[in-house]
Image (spheres, rainbow, N blue to C red):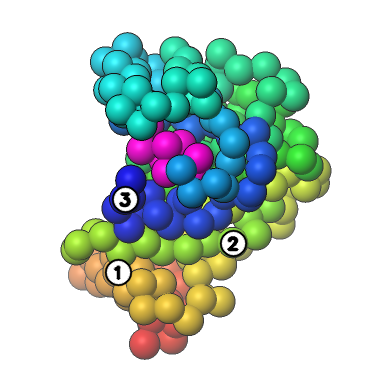
């Protein structure tokens, strides 16, 4: 079982020998890989729709792991209970949808639970949700897969809401990273916000906060 670079990055953050759940599993590639590589002993592979769960079933059966991987129909974490899992991956969904899962699942507020989140969109909104609900992002990595860049968060519940700036929501911990993929991601973000600034300037509008943001981003992405 080989994973693409995006899922490999997600797998790299999974703690060993934990009770693992893959939310939005689709083909169950991630839990199969983790078990085959002896990172975890068993897993729950969950999805909202029956079609992806059938895809997952085919993968699990092909690797003779029906006794190790439970398939579960669930809208996010709605069909899970407290003290059932402590390592959770949510990959390939929009950041707003992941935020909804977090906000409506009260039992996630446990310091024993580790979240590994790979949003496809709205990374800033997801960071804000985590910060506002007492979670700390202890690591962020960028996976480069072909011409696409994916950001992955590692987060734990801390208890107190995190104080943050607009810039924290935009770049998080990425400026601490020295790898090429992170620098590419920061460059991409810089271009996005620089375009916003130029558009405002062309409209004869001033935004000092945006101007400061662009100046700082330029330093980090060089």
Image check: 6 left or right of 73?
Answer: left
Neighbourhood count class around disc 2 (C-alpha, 10 Å): few under 14, some 14–19, many 20 upward:
some
- Image quadrant occupied by the C terminus: bottom left
Q: Earlier in the sequence, mark 1 or mark 3?
A: 3
Q: Is residue 217 above or below residue 162?
A: below
Q: Which residues are magenta?
A: 28-35
Q: Nearer the viewer, mark 2 or mark 3?
A: 3
In the image, 9 versus 105, the foreground residue is 9
Q: Secondary structure at mark 3?
A: loop
Q: Earlier in the sequence, mark 2 or mark 1?
A: 2
Q: How far apart in space, not on screen, are marks 1 and 3 (Cα)?
A: 28 Å
Image check: 137 left or right of 215?
Answer: right
Q: Is residue 144 above or below residue 85?
A: below
Residue at the spot of label 3:
2
Residue 32 inside the magenta-drawn segment: yes
Please report the residue visible at 32 percent of the width from the left and 58 percent of the height from the top.
Answer: 5
Residue at the spot of label 1:
188
Residue at the spot of label 2:
139
In the image, 222 versus 144, the foreground residue is 144
SS majority, magenta: helix
Residue 78 quadrant: top right
In the image, 192 versus 21, the foreground residue is 21
């Amino acid at each position: 079982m080989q994973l693409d670079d995006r899922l490999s990055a997600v797998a790299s953050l999974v703690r060993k020998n934990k009770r693992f759940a893959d939310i939005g599993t689709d083909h169950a590639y991630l839990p199969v890989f983790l078990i085959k590589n002896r990172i975890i002993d068993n897993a729950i592979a969950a999805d909202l729709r029956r079609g992806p769960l059938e895809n997952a079933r085919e993968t699990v059966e092909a690797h003779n792991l029906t006794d190790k991987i439970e398939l579960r129909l669930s809208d996010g974490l709605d069909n899970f209970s407290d003290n059932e899992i402590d390592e959770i991956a949510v990959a390939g969904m929009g950041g707003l949808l992941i935020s909804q899962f977090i906000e409506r699942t009260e039992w996630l507020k446990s310091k024993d639970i580790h979240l590994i989140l790979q949003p496809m969109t709205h990374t800033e909104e997801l960071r804000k949700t985590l910060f506002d609900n007492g979670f700390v992002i202890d690591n962020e990595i960028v996976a480069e897969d072909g011409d696409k860049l994916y950001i992955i968060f590692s987060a734990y519940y801390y208890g107190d809401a995190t104080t943050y700036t607009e810039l924290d929501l935009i770049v998080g911990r990425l400026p601490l990273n020295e790898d090429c993929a992170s620098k590419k991601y920061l460059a991409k973000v810089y271009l996005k916000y620089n375009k916003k600034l130029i558009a405002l300037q062309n409209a004869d509008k001033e935004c000092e906060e945006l101007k400061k943001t662009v100046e700082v981003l330029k330093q980090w992405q060089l």
